[in-house]
Image (cartoon, grey):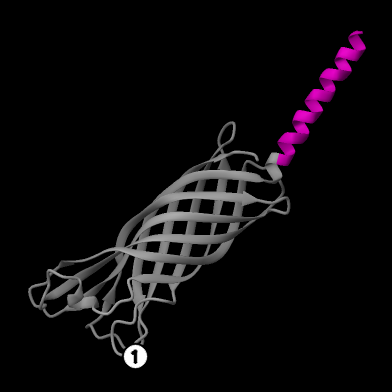
Amino acid sequence: MGCRRTAAALAVVAAIGSRADAVGQSGISVGVKGGLNIADVSSRQFGFGGVGTRNAWLGGAFITFMGDANVGVQPELLYTRKGFAALVPDGTAAVELDYVEIPVLVRFRVGPEGRRVRPAVFGGLFLALEAGCSLSGQLAGLEGSSDCEALVAGRGEMDGGFVVGAGVDIGLRDRLFLLLDARYSHGILNIDWQEESDKVSSRVWSFMVGAGLLLGF
């Protein structure tokens, strides 16, 4: 009788261990993240005196669907603050463009399962809807300086493009993990404010930290 109970207990432990391995290889995780944007724009023929960066924050939530082959899909919902600094007649003005952004990323984990620290690389596309536009800085020399149209009239109020980056997940306890994320995004839809040949595009370096929970489904 004792042998049977021991065998049954070992079978339960083996089943739990097998399930834990499966969760480690595939599953669903959710979390939140936030950090710093370093944003500017590219242009072949910019109408302002020069272009500089805008440093601002971003943050939001994500859900990751990982498969058994260390490949997964990660949709995100972010509030992200982009823009740039421009030289204007009386100095420098900051163009503050804010978006609700939806990146959809394909994520590749690096290294064997079971490690506490798991690097990853990712890439994908994003679509962003403008949530606000404002100017700050030295605006006295601009007509209509209380309105964003003073510098960025004719913008599309929507952006979209590609994202590439890398990150690392660090296991904490139970199903919780810490994540670090660095990425570059480049817009290809939006910002043709000047004449037809100008082709203004957003460019952003983002650095984020966050926390996640493995659901294990």
Front-most of 25 and 78? 78
Q: How many marks?
A: 1
Front-most of 128 and 124? 128
Callout 1: SS: loop
Q: Which quadrant is the C terminus positioned in?
A: top right
- In the image, farthest residue toward the top: 1
Which residue occupies 36% across, 59% down? Answer: 80
Residue 99: x and y in percent read: 35, 62
Toward which corner of the image does residue 105 lie, by quadrant?
bottom right
Q: Residues within 10 Å of mark 1 (few under 14, many from 20)?
A: few
Residue 173: x and y in percent read: 57, 32
The residue where tag 1 is placed is 196
Residue 177: x and y in percent read: 54, 40
Left or right of 209 on screen, residue 97: left
Magenta stretch: residue 41 in it?
no
Toward which corner of the image does residue 88 lie, by quadrant?
bottom left
Q: Which residues are magenta?
A: 1-22
Left or right of 86 on screen, residue 169: right
Vertical position of residue 141 compared to residue 94: above or below: below
Which residue occupies 34% across, 77% down? Answer: 191
Magenta stretch: residue 13 in it?
yes
Which residue occupies 79% across, 30% down? Answer: 15
Which residue occupies 40% across, 67% down? Answer: 204
Residue 168: x and y in percent read: 56, 50
Vertical position of residue 214 compared to residue 83: above or below: above
